């Protein structure tokens, strides 16, 4: 699951440098991504502060709900602006947003150790499977 979360955020970060480069198409990407940051932050808060598998599964499913909303938007942006995820330059006006996303990625990666003890819980395992499905739908790949 660690790779799933990281890959989802990496996908977002891949779009970020591109959206930061130009005012039109990249501002559109920012409008798509920014509303989902609070959901990621709520998820991280729960993962970092609970030992309860039921609460964890609930937080995972809430994030999945948001990811399901975001996934088609990411696919649409990727199709509308091919290569967007490969652009590297980020203007200063977008550095704060990029830095915030990078910190979220780090927190997601670090928080996985808190999920591992709960993976035996059926609800957590089911939420994890759901997350994998969503990530796969946006083209995320990983190695076991």
Image (cartoon, helix red, strand yellow):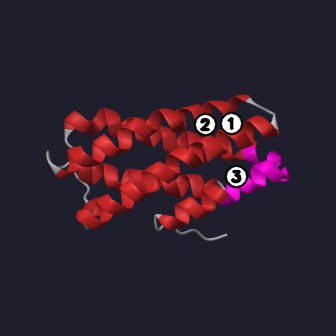
Q: Residues within 10 Å of mark 1 (few under 14, many from 20)?
A: many
Quadrant showing the C terminus:
bottom right
**Does the magenta-highlighted stretch encompass residue 38?**
no
Of the numbered discs 2 and 3, the one sitting upstream in the chain is 2
Do we see residue 79 in this rendering?
yes
Label ID, residue 47: 1
Q: Which residues are magenta?
A: 115-129
Which residue does the image show at 25% across and 37% down from the upper left? Answer: 94
- Disc 2 target residue: 43
Q: Is residue 1 left or right of residue 25?
A: right
Alpha carbons under labels 1 and 3: distance apart = 13 Å
Label 2 SS: helix
Of the numbered discs 1 and 3, the one sitting upstream in the chain is 1
- Disc 3 target residue: 127
Q: Residues within 10 Å of mark 2 (few under 14, many from 20)?
A: many
Q: Are marks 2 and 1 in contact (CB under 8 Å)?
A: yes
Q: Is residue 113 left or right of residue 117?
A: left
Do we see residue 20 in this rendering?
no
- Between residue 71 and residue 4, name the one nearer to us: 71
Give the vertical position of 77 relative to 100 (above or below).
below
């Amino acid at each position: 699951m660690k790779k799933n979360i990281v890959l989802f955020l990496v996908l977002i970060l891949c779009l970020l440098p591109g959206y930061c480069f130009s005012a039109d198409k990249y501002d559109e990407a920012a409008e798509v991504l920014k509303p989902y940051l609070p959901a990621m932050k709520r998820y991280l808060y729960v993962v970092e502060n609970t030992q309860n598998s039921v609460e964890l599964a609930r937080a995972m499913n809430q994030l999945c709900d948001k990811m399901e909303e975001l996934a088609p938007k990411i696919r649409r942006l990727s199709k509308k602006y091919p290569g967007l995820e490969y652009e590297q330059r980020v203007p200063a006006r977008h550095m704060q947003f990029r830095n915030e996303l990078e910190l979220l990625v780090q927190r997601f990666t670090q928080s996985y150790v808190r999920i591992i003890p709960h993976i035996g819980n059926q609800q957590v395992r089911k939420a994890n499977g759901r997350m994998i499905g969503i990530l796969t739908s946006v083209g995320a790949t990983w190695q076991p």
